[in-house]
Image: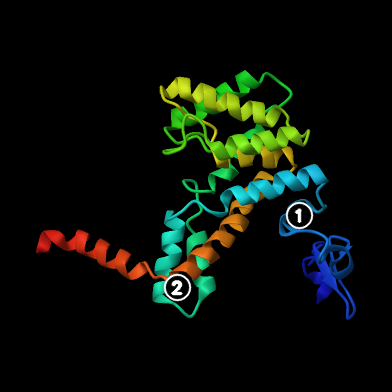
């Protein structure tokens, strides 16, 4: 019986025969043609539409992660499409499955330590605790360092500039910059705040729960992967990738 069942409830969206409501907004009259995809993503993550400044910043976060070339996720999508050309969504999903702690998903880790820190206290001390924890565990510090972009990640710096121009900068940015500085000293190398670190800090500033922060990357990269699959359809690379890897891996038997 219904009275004996758990309460099934969602406040995201509901429909009648004449309307569709999303977080209190009429989809047709209030949203379609009036907000862009980034604003819609912000609404889904926060339950409210962004201010103009928040809209600019959040859209920038997503744009910064749409594309980064032939990354492992793009290659996975292309190879999956080669095996299942009838299923574009499977190819995109295959690429998205690789967004973990090494690629894109590090947004979550950065957002978590930023949100768990005391942002009203001594930021240098807070950063020291964060760095010490990861160094002691011998694990990468999420959002810090990049194999190509150094001494600065241009994407991160652009995002920080946009946040500042919108009048929204705060201690979250100062903290993650201090984490990068202290990590560089502790490990003896240049470790800039990378784009996922910037997004983790800025998402925290925008009030986005760290548990959903990785979703920003998922939203963004899905767009890019659709583009990679389309290019794969028009100009295939997967057969050559497969042949080259197979030949290299089995050359010792020749």
| Dot placed on the residue nearer the N-terminal end, 2 or 1 | 1
- Determine whether 241 is above or below 212 in the image: below
| Left or right: 134, with 248 as reference point | right
Q: Quadrant of residue 237?
A: bottom left
Judged from the image, the secondary structure of the residue bearing numbered disc 2 is helix
- Determine whether 21 is above or below 60 in the image: below
| Left or right: 108, with 33 as reference point | left
Judged from the image, the secondary structure of the residue bearing numbered disc 1 is helix
- Determine whether 46 is above or below 92 in the image: above
Residue placed at 53% from the left, 48% from the top? Answer: 104
Q: Nearer the viewer, mark 2 or mark 1?
A: 2
| Left or right: 68, with 218 as reference point | left
Q: What is the crowding at mark 1: few (fewer than 14 residues within 10 Å), some, or many (at least 20)?
A: many
Closer-to-camera residue (30/227): 227
Q: What is the crowding at mark 2: few (fewer than 14 residues within 10 Å), some, or many (at least 20)?
A: few
Residues at marks 2 and 1, CA–CA distance in whole angstroms: 32 Å
In this view, which residue lies farthest toward the left?
A: 254
- Determine whether 198 is above or below 65 in the image: above
Residue placed at 43% from the left, 66% from the top? Answer: 78
Q: How is the image coloured?
A: rainbow
Question: Is residue 188 at least partly visible in the picture?
Answer: yes
Q: Position of residue 253 (x, y in %)?
A: 11, 63
Q: Are marks 2 and 1 in contact (CB under 8 Å)?
A: no
Residue placed at 52% from the left, 60% from the top? Answer: 96
Quadrant assignment for the C terminus? bottom left
Where does label 2 land, which residue? 234
Quadrant assignment for the N terminus? bottom right
Where does label 1 land, which residue? 39
């Amino acid at each position: 019986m219904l009275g004996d069942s758990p309460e099934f409830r969602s406040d995201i969206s509901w429909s009648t025969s004449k309307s569709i409501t999303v977080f209190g907004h009429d989809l047709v009259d209030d949203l379609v043609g009036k907000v862009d995809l980034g604003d819609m993503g912000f609404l889904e993550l926060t339950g409210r539409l962004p201010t103009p400044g928040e809209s600019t910043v959040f859209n920038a976060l997503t744009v910064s992660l749409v594309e980064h070339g032939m990354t492992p996720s793009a290659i996975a999508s292309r190879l999956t499409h080669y095996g299942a050309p009838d299923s574009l969504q499977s190819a995109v999903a295959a690429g998205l499955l690789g967004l973990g702690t090494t690629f894109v998903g590090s947004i979550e880790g950065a957002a978590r330590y930023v949100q768990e820190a005391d942002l009203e206290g001594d930021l240098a001390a807070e950063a020291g605790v964060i760095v010490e924890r990861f160094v002691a565990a011998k694990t990468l510090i999420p959002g810090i360092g990049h194999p190509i972009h150094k001494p600065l990640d241009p994407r991160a710096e652009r995002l920080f500039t946009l946040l500042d121009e919108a009048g929204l900068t705060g201690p979250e940015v100062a903290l993650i910059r201090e984490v990068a500085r202290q990590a560089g000293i502790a490990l003896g190398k240049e470790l800039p705040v990378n784009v996922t670190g910037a997004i983790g800090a800025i998402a925290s500033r925008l009030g986005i729960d760290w548990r959903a922060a990785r979703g920003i990357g998922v939203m963004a990269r899905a767009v890019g992967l659709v583009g990679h699959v389309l290019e794969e359809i028009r100009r295939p690379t997967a057969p050559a990738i497969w042949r080259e890897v197979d030949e290299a891996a089995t050359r010792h038997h020749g």
